[in-house]
Amino acid sequence: MVILASHAYLIPVFPLVAFAINILFSRWVRHRAAWISILASLAASALALPTVYQIARYGGSFMQEWTWIGLGSYTLTFGYLIDPLATVLLFVVTIVGTLIQIYSVGYMHEDPRYSRFFAYMSLFMFGMLSLVIASNFILFFMSWEIVGLCSYLLIGFWFE
């Protein structure tokens, strides 16, 4: 079980990389932005689904933390926790998020800010995946704020 779950921190990294590519290189990746986001979602799914299967089959949980800030005798940590609840939500977020992005290809086809929309979708997926596997309340709160920001950006996407 340790083999798959020990790399679970990479699951939200794929959508974060897609966000960075789509937002920084939006002029050059205009019509490929959707496929960058979809491939990142598929990569996150490809890493999440075997982990989901392994936790569902054998049970247990896996947690890894790193020190973020040391404040005297108190340290703030960040990390991830893979348990049965997290695996259910990983399954839902990766599958549904990928399907939403595939649907959005046709729906957003003629939009002038096509790459920006898929950048926001990738950031939203990063926030959701980070929220699901967060091991403490600080990381949970930061991920929740990213999800809230992306909700605002996606709901107000057509501002004119």
Image (tube, rainbow, N blue to C red):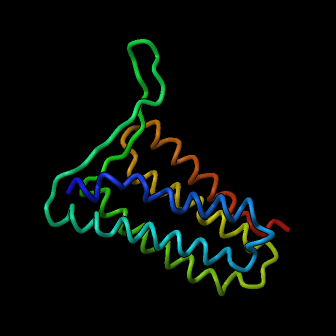
Name the quadrant containing residue 76.
top left
Task: List x then y, in percent, for residue 134.
Answer: 40, 46
Q: Is residue 71 above or below residue 25?
A: above
Q: Is residue 154 left or right of residue 28?
A: left
Q: Position of residue 120 (x, y in %)?
A: 65, 63
Residue at 20% x, 57% y: name it: 1
Question: x and y percent of residue 132 in the render?
Answer: 40, 54
Res. 28 image quadrant:
bottom right
What residue sits 28% from the left and 44% below the top?
A: 63
Q: Quadrant of residue 160?
A: bottom right
Total labels drawn: 0
Vertical comparison of 114 with 124: above or below: below
Q: Tell me where residue 51 appears, x and y as whole percent.
A: 28, 63
State whether residue 114 is above or below residue 129.
below
Q: Residue at x 44, y 66 (%)?
A: 44
Q: Is residue 43 left or right of residue 160?
A: left
